[in-house]
Amino acid sequence: MKEIILNISLAVPVALLLKFLFKKFAPSYEYLIPIVSIPICVLVAASLTKAILKYEICILNLVSRLTAS
């Protein structure tokens, strides 16, 4: 369940960034936004989720040390 929530929370900013880039630099290709952004968002979110979960213990230890001091 944690992975699904993390995937969604990471995919939304990527989708918004792609939408902005398409509107800014290629407004005539706006119809491609859903076709292009969905696979990219899934890949980026999945790889970031994998990396975050891999280093989750290290991140939690670092945060606990920072908040304890």
Image (cartoon, helix red, strand yellow):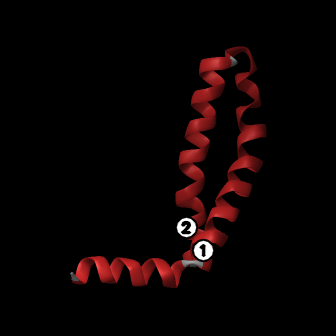
Label 1 Cα neighbours within 10 Å, binned few <14 / some 14-19 / many ≥20: some
State the image quarter where residue 52 is shown: bottom right
Cβ atoms under marks 2 and 1 closer than 8 Å: yes
Choose between 4 and 58: the one closer to the eye: 58
State the image quarter where residue 30 is shown: top right
- Residue under circle 1? 3
Q: Position of residue 55 (x, y in %)?
A: 57, 78
State the image quarter where residue 62 is shown: bottom left
**Mark 1: amino acid:** Glu
Q: Position of residue 29 (x, y in %)?
A: 75, 20
* Kind of element beneath mark 2: helix
Quadrant for the N terminus, please.
bottom right
**Mark 2: amino acid:** Leu
* Kind of element beneath mark 1: helix
Residue at the spot 60% in from the left edge and 74% down from the top edge: 3
Residue at the spot 68% in from the left edge and 55% down from the top edge: 44
- The single residue placed furthest to the front in the displayed view is 69
- The single residue placed furthest to the top in the displayed view is 28
Q: Position of residue 22 (x, y in %)?
A: 66, 25
Label 2 Cα neighbours within 10 Å, binned few <14 / some 14-19 / many ≥20: some
Residue at the spot 71% in from the left edge and 33% down from the top edge: 33
Left or right of 59? Residue 37 is right
Quadrant for the C terminus, please.
bottom left
Q: Label 2, label 1: how many angstroms apart (C-alpha)?
A: 5 Å
Left or right of 53? Residue 36 is right
- Residue under circle 2? 6
